[in-house]
Image: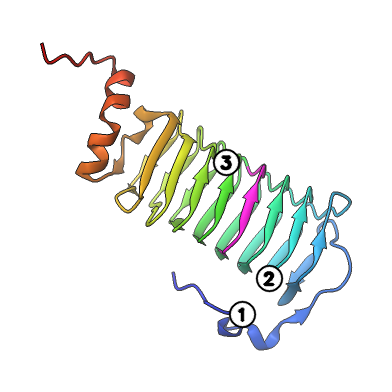
Amino acid sequence: MTVADELADLPYADLLRRHEGPLAVEGDYDTVHFGRLSFEDADRARGARFLESAVTDCVFGGTDLRRARFNDVWVEGSRFTGVSLVESDWLDSALTGCSLAGVEAFGSVLRRVVLRRCKLDSVNLRSAALHDVVFEDCVLREVDLGGARLDGVGFPGSRLEQVRLAGATLTKADLRGAVGIDLADGHDSLRGAVIGSAQLLDLAPALAQTLGITVKDR
């Protein structure tokens, strides 16, 4: 998936109209530009639909976006703190240079989504479904992927710190490009993943412990 570097590079850039005012529950946002806006706890947009839209330099703090749908949405330089994205649906979208902290996104579905130079801190993606998702040059710190399904997911240039994978199912997940893999749990869930030989050596002690293998040289 090709990701636009700038707003002007979007194929629908000339159609975008600037958004003013709050968000609405089940609102329809087609070819809308959200630029330098702040949405707080009082903003509720459950079930809202975003199509061919752009979000730049926005702040979302405690915003309710449960079950929102994002189709061909470009998000750049925005911050999400304590936001509810539970059971949200993302398709053909990209997040660049964004920060997500304390975000609840369990049960969400992400398909053909790229996250580039993003920082994810304590993001809850339990039981989520990730298909053809790329985390490029990202930091995933204490991200919970327990029970999630990762199909064709890649982590080039990304660092995984205390990531939870217990009960997750990995299919063609490629971890070879990750610059660090530190799992809090779920080492046995790496079945189905592709890793490099150096990464295998780094993970060997944890894998041995998970499998109940005692390693002794004498």
**Residue under circle 3?**
125
- Nearer the observer, 162 or 64: 162
Query: Which mark sits nearer the N-terminus, 2 or 1?
Result: 1
**Residue under circle 1?**
7
Query: Which mark sits nearer the N-terminus, 3 or 1?
Result: 1
Residue 132: image location, x then y, percent: 43, 56
- The residue located at (60%, 85%) in the rendering is 8
Residue 47 at least partly seen: no
Res. 107 image quadrant: top right
Res. 170 image quadrant: top left
Residue 175: image location, x then y, percent: 33, 47
Q: Which mark is residue 116?
A: none
Residue 35: image location, x then y, percent: 75, 73
Residue 148 at least partly seen: yes
Do the residues under discs 2 and 1 have CB atoms within 8 angstroms?
Answer: yes
Looking at the image, the residue that sits furthest to the bottom is 14
- Horizontal side of 67 relative to 201 (left or right) equals right
Q: What kind of residue is marked 1?
A: Leu
Total residue callouts = 3
- Sort mark 3 into few (<14), some (14-19) or many (20+) by Cα contacts within 10 Å: many
* Magenta span contains residue 95: no
**Residue under circle 2?**
56
Q: Which residues are magenta?
A: 96-105
* Quarter the C terminus occupies: top left
Q: What kind of residue is marked 2?
A: Thr
Residue 123: image location, x then y, percent: 60, 42
